[in-house]
Amino acid sequence: MKAAKFDYVRVSEAKEALSLLEDSDGSTKAMGGSQSLGPMLNLRLARPQKVVDVSGIADWRTVSKNGGRIRVGAAVTHAEIEDGVFAELRGHMLQDVAGVIAYRAVRNRGTIAGSIAHADPAADWVLATSALGAELELTSAKGSRRSTMPEFMLGAYAVDLQPDELISAVYVPEKTEQTRWGYYKFCRKTGEFAEASCAAYFDPSTRTARIVVGALGGAPQLLPDLSAKVAQEGLAAATPEAIAEAVKDIAPEKTAGDRRLFMTVIERCLRRALGE
């Protein structure tokens, strides 16, 4: 199929994009890299009267350090993070994750904020930013507000984003000497969305310990008890029994085979995080 007719506007300033959204009564959609909205337009699952391309907004294509956190502009692409274009993200967990998102053609165009706003349960950025404890800067013509990932992603493809708001930036913690992380997902074929995934992030200097599971059909789920035990005792705490209990708590409806798959990605993620 082909997309229904719509007007296309490419903007260079956030103010212009936000003004167009404010005046549209919901009939205007923003587009970053078009890797999510593009297929929806072609399948006519989305039929906006106007599409506003925000990929050229200069301020949204920058990365900077800000009070112990790194501000990643909304229109920064997966490939730019993967390639280390921005010095602030070299050697960061985001760089590791960016390199395993879909295919290079997708990474060349897809943007970090576009992926998060789409909120696919199996997407890499929604899981990784949840593990990192990321904050989102949500901006409208009226001003800006902050949201955390648990507050923002309400469920599959459902987010706390008003029709006149856009994600303008993603804030993640800076890497420290003590930071450890792991990321592992199972896909039947390279480039496909994950059938089970896990991200882990530990930083003793900030007393941070998060093990988060994705591809559950909804928002990523934190494993608080297992996170605390592994932070205190190391990999020895991640016994098959402890992992099985954690998976049962977040996915009681899954079959035994599915739960085993999630157990495996958790175990492999933790081995990557803890260097064993």
Image (cartoon, rainbow, N blue to C red):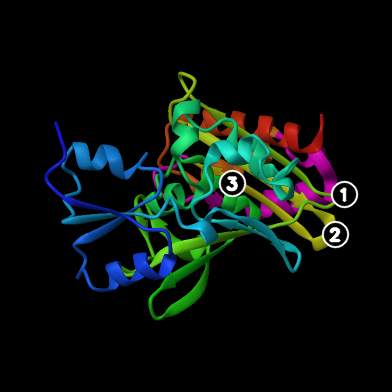
Which comes sooner in the sequence, label 3 or label 2?
A: 3
Q: Residue at x 75, y 40 (%)?
A: 91
Query: Which residue is the site of mark 2?
Result: 205
Residue 128 disc label: 3
- Disc 1 packing (10 Å; few <14; some 14–19; many ≥20): few
Q: Secondary structure at mark 1?
A: loop
Kind of residue at disc 1? Glu
- Circle 3: element type: helix
Residue 94: x percent and y percent? 64, 44
**Is residue 217 found left or right of 87 in the rendered image?**
left
Q: At 48% from the left edge and 76% from the top edge, which residue is drawn?
A: 144
Looking at numbered disc 2 in the image, what kind of residue is underneath it? Ser
Q: Earlier in the sequence, mark 1 or mark 3?
A: 3
Q: Which residue in the structure is indicated by mark 1?
A: 177
The image position of residue 83, as x and y in percent, is 64, 34
Q: Quadrant of residue 135?
A: bottom right
Instruction: Indicate whether residue 233 is drawn in magenta.
Output: yes
Displayed quadrant of residue 90 = top right
| Callout 1 touching callout 2 (CB < 8 Å) | yes
Residue 11 placed where, x, y %?
Answer: 37, 58
